[in-house]
Image (spheres, grey):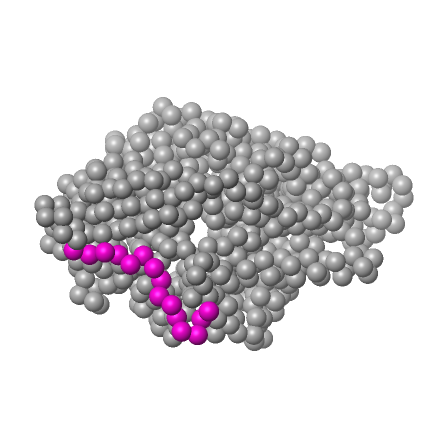
């Protein structure tokens, strides 16, 4: 693992070598917050796998760092080749920003936190409020070309150095203008006339990492397991990320221990994981999943991840589609703190507000991408996963201000949100571990798949050069997948009819029935549970996503989108047929009794 040795960001005149600006790369000490005074606090430093370079080149500005934004720059005649690119946090993961910049020929990337996203534009900044102060930057883990995080105070002189150079950012891309306009900053593309000295020097050390694993054997189905986890490593004090989640995990484990002392045993095995090195590219959980992949694929029913349990007051969750119904039911049973509402009520209200739809019937469950310890479980091993927490105040994220003082003053003064998250996590764990018939809905998966197909079809339509018969062309390209999705929906509906029958007969005394009926009932229960628990595995492509084969999940059809973007319709057809084959396999699997 690597550790910081020396970092520098400076603007200078390449002709005279005069330094015009030297970035501080340190966060201010906040009086009254001991965490900000810790001598072990890190400087602006991305944990990386291969960065030890100094670059003395000109600067370009590009607002979000997406591939589309880099294409917009290129179309505007702005080259980033051999430049250091200044990009803004948000919109996509940090690693993809740096990766995209590298594809465009950039020599380095500076990623800054714009006040429009999580600073004074949103509200009072710390210590007067929960939002990001001017010296704060986001520590992170990034590979590829050299990069450093910046505060908006350090980014301001760089943005000013671009004024009048290149093109106005507002003329190149949507939402390219940030919150520093209130300070007279104009957003331009550059490149700058001044040069940038970007230095990120690190040293490498062999460092042991330690996952802590606890296991509660199941009494009825010991070879079926629900895994729950949180990482405990942090960039700084980490009151929200990860310590709020770690506190919830410890309290949940204490509660399970009390139940065990009272004589309770889970029907299925419960495994608790405290992961190490999450901030270093998810190493702890990833290594554990890779080492135990065979038995996890055979036995794991679900993985429930809580990274930061509390970082705000809005409940947010990403999950495999099969969990939507269970999440709705569980959140209806957990009171929302200091109100007469449930977590479900507040979740639905916030979802409707975010969607701009006051008639929204169900709260939003996001698809899982990457970014926390669920990644290896879901994207690599095909284990249905949940990732959840209370969020919203991102102003302290990955900074020295993610402290107990910040948490207790602005976010959760009475720590009742921590209590609510622990209750919800425990309820979900016990439901999945103890329900005789797993309350997972495969029809939701088939319906979600249809929505993703609708999205990808619209995107493909925008990429087809011949617009004369666009509907026919798109329909032809998606013929196999549409047919497979229909098969999956019919199979899922059939399975859920059997599931409803099983839940009814269990409620009517399956346990008290005669031997033959009881044996048939248990066999049906086992078969249905097996189908819903392992449905996710059938969306894993053994070949992986082209170019990043470790990621194997096809749910949002990334290979199709990339082939369409590249105009490689031959590859598109191969990926479409491969995805359709996996979906048809899933449909057949659901009908096997």
Give left or right: position of 509 versus 103. right
Q: Position of residue 446 (x, y in %)?
A: 54, 42
Q: Work out whether residue 455 or residue 501 is closer to the camera in this orientation and state it.
A: 455
Is residue 268 positioned above or below 35 on the image? above
* Residue displayed at 42% across by 25% down: 574
Give left or right: position of 346 versus 437. left
Is residue 426 positioned above or below 368 on the image? below
Q: Which residues are magenta?
A: 20-34
Q: Position of residue 203 (x, y in %)?
A: 41, 42
* Residue displayed at 46% across by 66% down: 35
Q: Could you tell me if residue 90 is visible in this image?
A: no
Magenta: main secondary structure: loop
Q: Is residue 410 magenta?
A: no
* Residue displayed at 25% across by 32% down: 465
* Residue displayed at 76% across by 43% down: 221
Q: Could you tell me if residue 567 is visible in this image?
A: yes
Q: Work out whether residue 473 or residue 79 is closer to the camera in this orientation and state it.
A: 79
Q: Is residue 32 magenta?
A: yes
Furthest residue toward right: 514
Report the number of numbered marks.
0
Please tell me in which quadrant of the rendered image residue 22 appears: bottom left
Q: Work out whether residue 274 or residue 458 is closer to the camera in this orientation and state it.
A: 274
Q: Position of residue 501 (x, y in %)?
A: 73, 47
Q: Quadrant of the C terminus?
A: top right
Q: Position of residue 239 (x, y in %)?
A: 51, 63
């Amino acid at each position: 693992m690597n550790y910081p040795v020396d970092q520098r960001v400076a603007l200078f005149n390449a002709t005279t070598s005069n330094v015009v600006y030297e970035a501080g790369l340190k966060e201010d000490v906040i009086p009254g917050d001991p965490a900000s005074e810790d001598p072990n606090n890190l400087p602006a430093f991305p944990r990386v796998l291969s960065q030890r370079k100094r670059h003395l080149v000109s600067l370009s500005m590009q607002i979000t760092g997406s591939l589309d934004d880099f294409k917009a720059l290129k179309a505007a005649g702005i080259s980033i080749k051999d430049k250091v690119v200044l990009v803004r946090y948000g919109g996509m993961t940090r690693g993809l920003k740096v990766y995209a910049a590298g594809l465009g020929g950039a020599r380095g990337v500076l990623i800054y936190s714009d006040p429009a996203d999580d600073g004074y534009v949103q509200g009072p900044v710390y210590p007067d409020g929960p939002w990001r102060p001017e010296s704060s930057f986001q520590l992170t883990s990034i590979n590829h070309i050299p990069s450093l995080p910046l505060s908006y105070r350090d980014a301001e002189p760089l943005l000013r150095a671009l004024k009048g150079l290149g093109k106005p950012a507002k003329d190149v891309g949507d939402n390219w203008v940030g919150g520093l306009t209130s300070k007279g900053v104009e957003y331009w593309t550059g490149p700058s006339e001044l040069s940038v000295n970007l230095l990120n020097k690190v040293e490498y050390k062999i460092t042991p990492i330690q996952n802590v694993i606890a296991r509660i054997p199941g009494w009825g189905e010991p070879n079926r397991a629900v895994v729950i986890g949180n990482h405990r490593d942090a960039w700084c004090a980490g009151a929200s990320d990860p310590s709020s989640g770690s506190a919830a995990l410890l309290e949940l484990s204490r509660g399970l221990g009390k139940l065990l002392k009272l004589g309770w045993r889970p029907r299925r095995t419960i495994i608790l994981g405290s992961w190490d090195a999450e901030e270093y590219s998810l190493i702890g959980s990833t290594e554990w999943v890779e080492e135990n992949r065979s038995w996890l694929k055979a036995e794991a029913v679900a993985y429930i991840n809580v990274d930061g349990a509390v970082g705000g007051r809005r409940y947010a969750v990403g999950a495999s589609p099969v969990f939507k119904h269970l999440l709705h039911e569980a959140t209806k049973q957990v009171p929302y703190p200091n109100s007469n509402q449930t977590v479900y009520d507040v979740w639905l209200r916030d979802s409707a507000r975010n969607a701009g739809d006051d008639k929204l019937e169900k709260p939003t469950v996001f698809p899982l991408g990457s970014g926390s310890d669920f990644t290896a479980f879901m994207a690599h091993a095909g284990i249905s996963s949940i990732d959840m927490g209370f969020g919203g105040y991102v102003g302290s994220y990955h900074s020295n201000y993610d402290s107990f003082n910040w948490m207790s003053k602005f976010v959760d003064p009475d720590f009742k949100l921590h209590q609510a998250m622990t209750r919800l996590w425990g309820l979900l764990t016990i439901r999945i571990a103890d329900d005789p018939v797993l309350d997972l809905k495969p029809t939701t998966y088939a319906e979600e798949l249809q929505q993703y197909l609708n999205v990808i079809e619209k995107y493909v339509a925008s990429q087809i050069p011949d617009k004369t018969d666009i509907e026919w062309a798109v329909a032809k390209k998606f013929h196999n997948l549409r047919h497979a999705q229909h098969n999956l929906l019919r199979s899922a509906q059939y399975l859920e009819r059997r599931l409803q029958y099983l839940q009814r007969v269990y409620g009517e005394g399956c346990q008290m029935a005669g031997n033959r009926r009881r044996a048939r009932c248990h066999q049906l229960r086992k078969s249905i549970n097996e189908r819903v628990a392992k449905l996710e595995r059938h969306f894993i492509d053994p070949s992986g996503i082209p170019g990043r084969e470790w990621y194997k999940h096809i749910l949002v059809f990334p290979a199709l989108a990339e082939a369409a973007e590249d105009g490689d319709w031959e590859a598109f057809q191969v990926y479409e047929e491969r995805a359709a084959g996996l979906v048809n396999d899933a449909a057949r699997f659901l009908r096997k009794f």
